Image: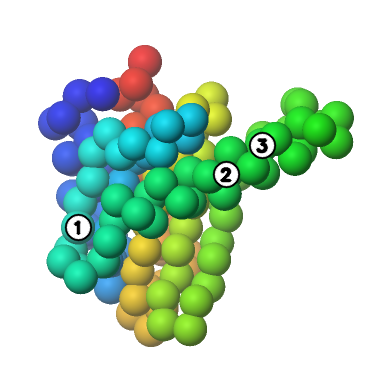
Amino acid sequence: MGKNETQEAFEYAQNEISGLKAISAVEIETGLAHGSLVVDKSFDLDAASAYNAEVVKAKIKAKNAMGMTKEKVELMIIELSHQIHMIQPTPNEKFIVYMAADRQSANIGITRKAVLEVSKRIEASLN
C-alpha cells in the first residue's frame, strides 16, 4: 500500500470527520494495521483494529456458513455511549477501514460518507 495514498486518505478523513479519534486500514486475516492516524493519543488503535478485524472475520465466516457466499459485508456501525465506531470492509474483503469518533461531535451521515471514500482510496492503493 502506498504510504502517500494512505496518509492522504486518512488526512481526508481527519478533515471530514468531526471528533475523529483514530482511523486505520487493517488486514482482516492478520489484524495488522497497514496504516493509521491517531488523533486522540489515549485511544488504543492497535488493540481496537485487531479486535474489530476479528469481528469482521467472524461475520464473513457466519454469512458463508449460511450459504450467503455472494453477499458482501458492508459498513458496520457500532454506537457506544460516548463514541461511534465504523468498520468498512474493502470490496475484496481483505482489509477494513476502522474508525472511531466522539459520538457527540460526529455527524453519522458525513462520517459514513468519509469512511466509504477512505475505503475506496485504500482499495485502489492496494491494486
Residue with the most extreme top position: 127
Query: Please, what secondary structure does the residue beneath circle 3 have?
Result: helix
Q: Earlier in the sequence, mark 3 or mark 1?
A: 1
Instruction: Kindly check if marks 3 and 2 are in contact, taking CB atoms under 8 A apart as contact.
Output: yes
Q: If you read the primary sequence from the N terminus, does the residue marked by circle 1 or circle 2 appear first?
A: 1
In the image shown, does 57 or 103 lie closer to the viewer? Answer: 57
- Position above or below: 81 against 124: below
Callout 2 amino acid: Val
Q: Does the image show residue 119?
A: no
Q: Is residue 117 left or right of residue 28?
A: left
Q: Secondary structure at mark 1?
A: strand
Query: In the rendered structure, which amino acid carries the disc numbered 3?
Result: Ile
Where in the figure is residue 7, as x and y percent of width and height?
A: 17, 40
Where residue 1 appears, as percent x and y from the top left, is 26, 24
Above or below, 107 relative to 1: below
Question: Mark 3 and mark 2: span between their CA atoms?
Answer: 6 Å
- Residue at 54% over, 30% down: 93
Question: Which residue in the protein does label 3 denote?
Answer: 60
Quick check: 108 above or below 57?
Answer: below
How many numbered marks does the figure carry? 3
Return the x and y of residue 85 as percentages of the image width and height. Answer: 45, 63
Residue labelled with disc 2: 56
Judging by the rendered image, the residue that carries numbered circle 1 is 38
**Where is residue 72 shown, x and y percent of the image?**
67, 35
Sort mark 2 into few (<14), some (14-19) or many (20+) by Cα contacts within 10 Å. Answer: many
Q: Is residue 86 left or right of residue 105?
A: right
Q: Residue 127: which quarter of the image?
A: top left
| Residue 62 image label | none
Looking at the rendered structure, the kind of residue marked 1 is Val
